[in-house]
Image (cartoon, rainbow, N blue to C red):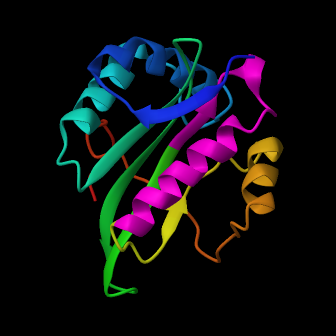
Amino acid sequence: MEPVSIRAANATDVPELCRLLGQLFRLEADFSPDPSRQAKGLERLLAADPSRAAVFVAEAGGRVVGMVSLQVLVSTAEGGEVGLLEDLIVDESLRGRGIGTALLAAAEGWARSRGLLRLQLLADRENGPALGFYRARRWGPTQLVALRRAHWRPGPPD
């Protein structure tokens, strides 16, 4: 395999990032691949204030082979800014070669350089390889449960 480099994503990467997100969302029970929706989300992230959001890509041989995104939130518990790490994915044909570790290191470095007090992420509870990956890199579970409500979907009123 060619050497891998990590760099900030740009708008020309969006089609390849959508391809990678398709691989990720096929693994997650809560989401489905939808390249149009994923492209909209990526375009918003890439247009965001660079001190509030970042998308990094792993590139090998001129091809995007992995990605990770982060966004800054304010935590009242921490009394400051924290980061939400999302969409860490490496092309399924290249996993186990250190690319995910390099992407995670880039994300953690970005967070540290901005003084974020912690990073957090959500992972599918059935994705054993992903959970093992994070645990091996000193990420631990919390006692919190993730819940969501999609306000824009039809349903009974509150």
What residue sits 17% from the left and 48% below the top?
A: 49
Instruction: Examine the image and state in which quarter residue 8 appears.
Output: top left
The percent coordinates of residue 80 (x first, y second) are 30, 81
Residue 156 makes an appearance in the image: no
Does 148 sit above or below residue 129? below
Q: Nearer the viewer, residue 12 or 130?
A: 12
How many numbered markers are drawn? 0
User: Which image quarter holds the N terminus?
Assistant: top right
The percent coordinates of residue 130 (x first, y second) are 74, 45
The percent coordinates of residue 104 (x first, y second) are 59, 50
Q: Magenta residues?
A: 87-113
Does 79 sit above or below residue 132? below
**Is 110 on the left-hand or right-hand side of 91?**
left
Q: Nearer the viewer, residue 121 or 93?
A: 93
Q: Nearer the viewer, residue 28 or 150?
A: 28
What residue sits 62% from the left and 21% below the top?
A: 23
**Is 150 on the left-hand or right-hand side of 6?**
left
What residue sits 31% from the left and 36% below the top?
A: 153
Residue 132 makes an appearance in the image: yes
Does 143 sit above or below residue 40? below
Does 53 sit above or below residue 138? above
**Is 42 on the left-hand or right-hand side of 27?**
left
Q: Principal SS element in the magenta part? A: helix
What residue sits 36% from the left and 74% below the top?
A: 115
The percent coordinates of residue 7 (x first, y second) are 43, 34
| Magenta-span inclusion, residue 43 | no
Q: Nearer the viewer, residue 144 or 8?
A: 8
User: Which image quarter holds the C terminus?
Assistant: bottom left
Instruction: Examine the image and state in which quarter residue 37 appears.
Output: top left
| Magenta-span inclusion, residue 105 | yes
Instruction: Examine the image and state in which quarter residue 143 appears.
Output: bottom right
